[in-house]
Image (cartoon, rainbow, N blue to C red):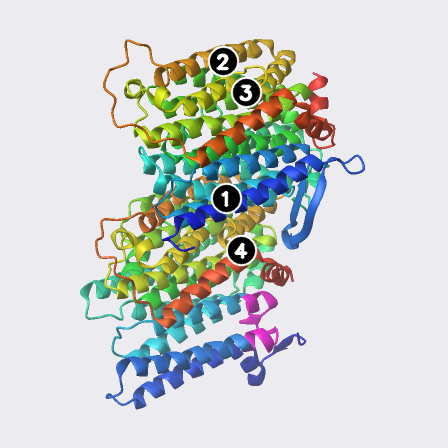
Amino acid sequence: MPAKRPDLSRRLALVGTLISALIALVCAATYSPVDGNSVVDITKWNWIPSLGISYYLAADGISMVMVALTGIASVAAVLFSWNIEERANEFFGFFLTLIGGVYGVFISFDLFLLFVFYEIAIIPKYFLIALWGSTRKSYAAMKLVLYSFVGSSMALIGIMAAFVVSGSVSFDLQQLILHPYAPEFQRWAFPVTFIGFVILAGLWPFHTWAPTGHVAAPTGASMLLAGVVMKLGAYGALRVPMTLFPMGASIWREEIALLAAIGIVAGALVALVQNDFKFIIGYSSVSHMGFVLLGLLATTETGLNGAVLQMFSHGILAGLLFAVVGRMVYSRTHTRDLSKLETMQVGKQLPFAATIFLIAALASVGMPGFSGFVAELHVITGAWSSYSYLALMAGLGVILGVAYSMRALFTVFWPSASAREPEIGTPLSGLTIQEKTGAILLVTTSLVIGIYPRLLLDIIAPSLQSPLLKPLLDQSSTL
Amino acid sequence: MQSLIQTTTYGDILSLTGPEWILVLTALVVLAVSFTQAKTTSNTAGTRRLTWISLVGVFLAGGVLLFNQPLGSVKGDVFFVSEATRWVKLGIVCLAGLSLWLHLGTEKHLPHQGEFHALILFATVGMLLLVGADHLIMIFIALELTALSLYVLAGFEKSKSICTQTAFKYFLIGGVSAAFLLYGFSLIYGVTGHMQLTDIQVNLASKSTDPLLALGLIMALAGFGFKIAAAPFHMWAPDVYQTAPTPVASLIASASKVAGFFVLGRFLWEGFGQHAGSIQVTHWTSGWIGIIGLLACLSMVIGNFAALKQINLRRLLAYSAVAHSGYALLGIASPSTLGPASVSFYMMTYGISIVGMFGLLQILEQNGHASDFKSLESLRFRSGWMTACLTILILSMAGIPPMVGFLAKFNLFIAALKGSSQPLGLILLVVLALGASAVSLYYYLKILKAAFCKGDCDQPASMTINAYQFTLVSLTVAGVLLLGLFPEPILSRLTNAFGI
């Protein structure tokens, strides 16, 4: 890619993500279980037979939802990266590698392959943040990568142990679940693997990489980071430890669910006192990912439904929030300090940005009609039947969510009259067509899912009945 | 393959040691050519001729190994050839060839090039003999042949006092470790009355544990620990990596390690299999696995943490090599049949990437840069090709898929976990190894960051890269990528070969 032609790289990246997004959406829309088996094979090839590794791509309903999310979020993220001028070819190179890795994780049913894609998704983040980021970028990039790497190493231990203990000759997930793992083994294997994956999903207290990483990353990268990369952790946790070690899950779920609930509340509380606009969104991500994890650990069908929905919804809405903060506001005002933004009359100058932020904030705190509402409702209902006091904490998290969103909204876009100062600095340039398109794309998606969630629920439902997750759900219903 | 040979006729010995003889003859030819070369011929052209001759010899040796190598053993089992040794030797010959190719790219030449090439070839012969050795005396002779050649080579740049100093240090530590090794061997001989590895095993089976034997084993392990640069016997490595001529450093870092690890694994499992012991927390029995485990821990921790502080890239590579030795020791400690195969695969693939790294360092140095972080700054703007190669090689060493470094490590860990009868015997070591890799990722990423970020270097002069360097580095990068994406042909053959 020629370095002198940023527009060419941009267009190519847009076309590439658009095509893959279209394929992803079409696949998701036409998905239907074959012969009662929810897992639809895409390709299977004996990659390294001597280690029992195959290049096995397949998808079930949960993968389909995640793939659709990746498609939409990646297109939007390219649109919001339109202002990358410096070394655009490299930027989009790393960017697309990251997206490729993410797609790969969601459709791998061979655990080795899944891990390979998982790692492929980690390394580009380092470069995206360290080269194009802001605010302590080296520190944030290194912290993020090391956290992810430690997490993935823990996950790798679990995967290898599962393979070796089963005496199996294959890393194929559907082969591995046939082995009944001993309860003593599951007792330690589950927490190691689970925590390993959810470090990337921002489980409290392992979440500290997330806000710094999000803040330092360039807008497109933080959209991907919050939108899809954090989902990798939650998805991996559901796909590997919860599927393989259901007994371990029932032993540990309450403890880890408590951490998730603490994450919801702590993330929201910290977001409430931040003065950096982007940190608010960063911590809100931690809070929202807490819902995903709580939904997973409820280990009921409603909870899992809610978790997947929340992954999708948060992927869309966090992308949107970061887009407003990073691209629409920060790249024009060059400050994210709330007290400075308060005086700039951003709301008057950028009415579109204000509207989008209002919608996104309302949607993410659970305004009916948007995807956030359905998702959080499912999670809380699911959690209620398992542990009611944690559901209450989650409810508190929702209320705090309203508080910090509204605080940010009113301070930045509609400051009170007293704070408004008469002089206006240099006028801010208007929003570009790419920004508007991206924002509308994301808002529409959220709205569609909010009004008609069965679109996703119908895809997810058969997967929850599949042999993959059946042991998990049976386990919890007997308790 | 042909039927096994088991005889003492000279003809058969010659055919068993075909590749070794070819290399010895090549070395003699190189020496002869260098004597006849007129002093007036251009230094570089003359040297390149010598290198080409050596390379032809290496290719021939590799060809013999690949297509026409009979299997068998010399009577008395002093020396043997099996499928496994054939593959390992092929790996060593390839790595030695790559190191020689590295020498083609050298522009500044030292005097005595004939001897230089001959010594490299002799060192390679020593490694090949080491791989086939089945007898304590043979192991010692082969080790010394390699080591003595490498001592001289490490100090070849004798006009620089630092080089002489390093070589002397290398020689002293090497000499002491050889003494340890020999003393250990003599104790083992004293206890068992045998020199041949399988005889030792048979003899020990009928004896109770002897404290002298333990002492002998520990002494021998200290000697081997020096060869493979495992901590705490690694002190020579950073100095040698830093000051030895690049091809020599790359030979020491790659081929000699492959041979050292192979013979260490054979020595321990063939000779002392039933004294392995166990490091299970619940069923602790003393044995050499405990010592190997300790060496592995020390190497991983010391190597990685010392590497964090380095500013010179060669020293950094040396410490990271210590850490890599630590990972590979896990495979040695694994009693499964997968263990030795995974160690060999690991060291060979690691060898490829380290040769490539030395190629890149050579380019940097010939463009007038020191091999430290500063000279890497804004490499992206001086040579995109070099940056891409650097990224792939470094990520392979860090163990990031889809590069082969990850697969080799994964294979090693699986072998370690599969090994013991209780599958989780080595899991603590594997956990430590993964933790150590996380530490190593930090300094590997620091290298990449220096290359990608814009430094304050205001002369974006492009790098001059000659054709030899270009082909060498491209070859290693292609190897690292292809082996990572399609490892099956090599991996399955290697595993099968060791299974026999």
Q: Are marks 3 and 2 on the same chain?
A: yes
Quarter in which the C terminus of chain B is drawn: bottom right
- Let me know if residue B156 is in the magenta part: no
Question: Mark 3 vs mark 2: which is more N-terminal?
Answer: 3
**Residue B275: % across, % down:** 55, 50
Q: Is residue A402 left or right of residue B13?
A: left
**Residue B313: % across, % down:** 30, 54
Residue at the spot of label 4: B484
**Residue A3: % across, % down:** 37, 53
- Residue drawn at (46%, 66%) of the image: B475
Tag 1–tag 3 contact (CB < 8 Å): no
Above or below: residue A313 compared with residue B85? above
- The local secondary structure at tag 3 comes to helix
Separation of marks 3 and 2 at Cα, in angstroms:
9 Å
Residue at the spot of label 3: A291
**What mark, if any, has residue A397 been given in the picture?**
2
Label 3 neighbourhood size at 10 Å, few (<14), some (14-19), many (20+)? many
Residue at the spot of label 1: A14
- Nearer the observer, B115 or A131: A131
